[in-house]
Amino acid sequence: MSYPNLNQPNAVENTILGISAIQIGTVRNDQFLGSNNGNIFDAKSGDDNLYGGDSRDILNGNTGNDFVSGGSGDDILFGDEGNDIILGNLGNDLIFGGKGNDSINSREGNDIVYGNRNDDFIDGGKDDDTLFGGKGDDIILGSEGDDYLFGNQGTDTICGGEGNDFISGNEAADILGGCEGNDTIYGGEDNDTLTGCQGDDILYGDLGNDSLIGGSGNDIFVLQAGRGFDIIGDFTLGQDSIALTGGLSFSQLGITQNTQGTLIKNVLTGEDLGVMIGVSANAITSANFRLI
């Protein structure tokens, strides 16, 4: 995964100063410069640059491949159509990528970002952000802070970064990593790969046949009947645990050895729930399980 170059404003043909509260663009490539009083900019067509000022601005790139930079206020930023670059900068911003393959970094503040359609790159930057990928195959980075990260539709790649993050892949086969911190990771639908990395993480594959790797720390792997077969890649005895949910209890389980490790089965239904790779079934007791 390569980090996109976000320092790419467009070459412009016209400059519009924020001397009025509402400014409308032209068909050319315009540059909008915000004031200290708060501006509403609608760039219309063209590949435009929009810069907010020190107050709360509303910036809409509209059509074209636009560069939208929010300034220091609590801004509302729209990329709209085209492949846009959107920077939240300071403040608690609300950002919408719109159509196109957008590159977004909300930077500082507790921001809310919607990638919307197509394949987006979203970086929450500092502080506690809520990021939604939307449709398309998105890359989402929580970076610093305690973030809420949602892939939504598409085959997404999500990394929580620093902080204690909540991560949900939702639809499609996603690659989800907690990275640093004590993270909670939900795979959602389809066959997902969940990696806790550092910290004490909770990994719930949910629907589909998922791969769960806790990494370092005291990790919890969640199993539920009727949700698919999960492969637990690095269960550490005396450190990690299996959480049973949805009415599942230890008395319903069959613990047997297979060629991979310890197979966990629901003896009431015959459903295979998961396997703990490289773990001897003789070492597994009820102490390795908990109910949630």
Image (spheres, rainbow, N blue to C red):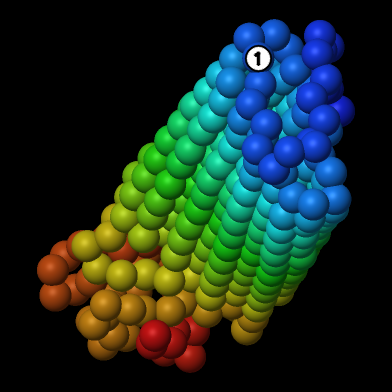
Does residue 136 lie above or below 157 as drawn?
above
Residue 243 screen position, x and y as percent: 43, 79
Q: Residue sitting at 79 percent across and 25 percent down?
A: 16
Rate crowding at label 1 as few (under 14), some (14 to 19) or many (20 or more) other CA atoms within 10 Å: some
The quarter of the displayed image where residue 166 is located: bottom right
Q: Residue 145 vs residue 271: left or right?
A: right
The residue lying toward the viewer, choosing from 74 and 156, is 74
Does residue 29 lie above or below 225 as drawn?
above
Of helix, strand and loop, which one carries label 1? loop
Q: Which residue is mark 1?
A: 26
Residue 187 screen position, x and y as percent: 44, 55
Does residue 54 lie above or below 204 as drawn?
above
Residue at the front extreme, as displayed: 20
The quadrant of the rendering that contains the C terminus is: bottom left
Q: Amino acid at mark 1?
A: Thr
Residue at the bottom extreme, as displayed: 287
The quadrant of the rendering that contains the N terminus is: top right
Q: Residue 271 vs residue 260: left or right?
A: left
Q: Residue sitting at 79 percent across and 36 percent down?
A: 18
Q: Is residue 9 visible?
A: yes
Q: Residue sitting at 32 percent across and 85 percent down?
A: 250
The residue lying toward the viewer, choosing from 255 and 186, is 186
The residue lying toward the viewer, choosing from 163 and 75, is 75
Q: How many marks?
A: 1
Does residue 155 lie above or below 144 as drawn?
above
Residue 4 screen position, x and y as percent: 77, 28
Q: Is residue 106 visible?
A: no
The quarter of the displayed image where residue 197 is located: bottom right
Q: Residue 282 vs residue 22: left or right?
A: left
The residue lying toward the viewer, choosing from 179 and 41, is 41
